[in-house]
Amino acid sequence: MNYYVYVERKFSAAHALRGYKGKCERLHGHNWVVRVSLTGKKLDKTGMLLDFTELRALVDGVLAKLDHCYINEVPPFDKQNPTAELIAAHVFTEMKKLKLHKGVAVHQVRVWESDASCAIVTQ
């Protein structure tokens, strides 16, 4: 049996898409929504894959580097285009670097730049 948990967190930041022909090449901002999903096969002794409070804190730590920033100036986006897809990949990679409980892995990261536009990265 596989278990999945996720949290959604928000941050606000500006970006500009390099090499894009359209209005998004200009500086603009979003109220981003990020969903991080974890998976595992075993629950801990309290019956949890990972406590939601702990997961929120981990995700908030990753997003703190982007919150209220001009994303184009934050590595790796000083070199990489700050698209929703690449932001999702960045969050996924940063979450994988964190020490999670044994047997718990990052499953999926979703990043919304608007209510109707979302990028998804999965293992």
Image (cartoon, rainbow, N blue to C red):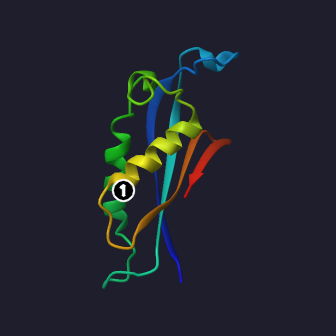
11 or 108: which is nearer to us?
108
Residue shown at 38%/29% (left/top)?
75
Label 1 crowd (10 A; few <14 / some 14-19 / many >=20): some
Observer able to see residue 79: yes
Q: Position of residue 112 (x, y in %)?
A: 58, 42
Where disc 1 sits, the SS reads helix
Image position of 59 with respect to 18: above or below: below
82 or 26: which is nearer to us?
82
Amino acid type assigned to the residue bearing label 1 in the image: Arg
Give the image quarter of residue 25: top right
27 or 17: which is nearer to us?
17
Q: Quadrant of the C terminus?
A: bottom right
Residue shown at 46%/42% (left/top)?
90
35 horizontally vs 48: left or right:
right
Residue shown at 51%/35% (left/top)?
31
Observer able to see residue 9: no
Residue shown at 70%/16% (left/top)?
22
Residue at mark 1: 56
Q: Quadrant of the N terminus?
A: bottom right
39 horizontally vs 119: left or right:
left
- Figure disc tally: 1
Image position of 80 with respect to 4: above or below: above
Q: Position of residue 114 (x, y in %)?
A: 61, 37
